[in-house]
Amino acid sequence: MTAFDSGHESATGGSPQAFGGPTPGSAAGPDGRTHLSESLRVDAVSKAYGQVQALDRVSLAVHHGEVVALVGDNGAGKSTLVKVIAGVIEPDEGSISVEGSPVSIRGPQDAARFGIRTIFQDLALAGNLSVVDNLFLGRELTKGPLPLRQADFRSMRRRTVEVLDGLGIGTIDDVDAPVERLSGGQRQTVAVARAMLTNCATLLLDEPTASLGLREARSVMDLVRRLRDQGTGILIITHNMRQVFEVADRIVVLHVGRVRASYRTSETLPEVVVKAIMGKAGNEGVG
Ligand SMILES: Nc1ncnc2c1ncn2[C@@H]1O[C@H](COP(=O)(O)OP(=O)(O)OP(=O)(O)O)[C@@H](O)[C@H]1O
Ligand SMILES: [Mg+2]
């Protein structure tokens, strides 16, 4: 039992989660390996910003219990893809499937309903609200029977401290202070904690450790592994090749809006991936 096993289903707004729980569907394949079911698939997704083709028919899948690292140079389209999946921007074309079925994600609420949770590169916290408020924004814990139901501030505060402790974060000593008074790294920790507060089917992490200290970055990576082991499908964007090889099962390389290569981590080497990122490799590797 971790601090992140959520006991508050009502936190998602009372709607039933599309995600059937932490046990992923799986089946043993002919090679004896367990093949986990797809939590997310994007098919031929394109997005242009004026003249810039940020995404050009990008396809990829994330399975339950799998970490996929999405890598690529600055401007390759990584954050754009995350925003499309999270329902923040609409793609020009292409489709998204969740648990094997096509879905229409027209806004962040839809993404949440389909069990997709996101940590964006630009964090999107409410600066004037406290750490506790940010963690539970839009999914407040409540107590009491329906007509008299009220916000359960004490539980939210307790959970906040638990979650930050679980992340190994000792540096935020006042969870009631407004987030705008925190350092960049502390803010990022709050964003990570927010995304990890409840179980989700798919977790999208856009450079979650970019401004974290070593210890915090390591805690986030530990958490990623823990969530993966619980069956969450994770798509993580990072420029840190060491992290990629530490945590990812597969690697997808984006280059100028296109999937340039993909690899099983166990079957490739950092220098090969770096070459692909720089645009020096062909479409090698596995799908
Ligand atoms: N809102 C926007 N308006 C116009 N162009 C945009 C917008 N957002 C992104 N772009 C362009 O789309 C391309 C892809 O950007 P994106 O942010 O997805 O890259 P990225 O791979 O996340 O890069 P980084 O590693 O620097 O975060 C870039 O050329 C960028 O300039
Ligand atoms: Mg980005």
Image (cartoon, grey):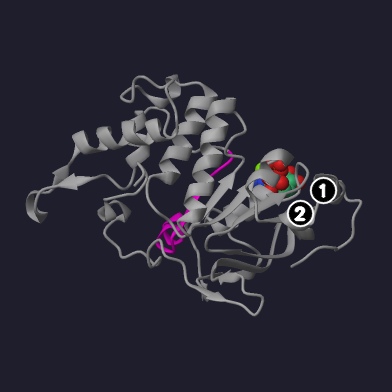
Q: Is residue 136 magenta?
A: no
Classify residue 184 by image quadrant: top right
Q: Is mark 1 within 8 Å of ligand 1?
A: no
Look at mark 2 in the image and give the residue it sits on.
253
Tell me: 107 left or right of 61: left
Residue placed most toward the observer, 166 or 173: 166
What's the residue type where badge 1 is placed? Ile
The total of numbered circles placed on residues is: 2
Question: In which of the image's four quarters is ligand 1 placed?
Answer: top right
Q: Residues within 10 Å of mark 2 (few under 14, many from 20)?
A: many
Residue 189 screen position, x and y as percent: 48, 32
Q: Which residue shows up at 47% across the image and 37% down it?
A: 191
Residue 53 visible: no
Q: How would you rate the neighbour count of disc 1 (Cα within 10 Å): few for under 14, some for 14-19, many for 20 or more?
A: many
Residue 116 is a magenta residue: yes
Q: Amino acid at mark 2?
A: Val
Residue 200 falls left or right of residue 283: left
Marks 1 & 2, CB-CB < 8 Å contact: yes
Element marked by disc 1: helix
Q: Secondary structure at mark 2?
A: strand
Q: Which mark is residue 277?
A: 1
Is the CB atom of the residue marked by disc 2 within 8 angstroms of ligand 1's nearest atom? Answer: no
Q: Is residue 73 visible?
A: yes
Magenta extent: 108-121
Residue 26, percent from left and from top: 51, 72
The location of residue 173, given as percent across then percent down, is 36, 19
Give the CA separation, mark 1 to mark 2. 6 Å
Relative horizontal placement of residue 252, taking residue 228 as reference (left or right):
right
Hey, which residue is sitting farthest right in the picture? 280
Q: Residue at x 26, y 37 (%)?
A: 156
Above or below, 189 relative to 69: above
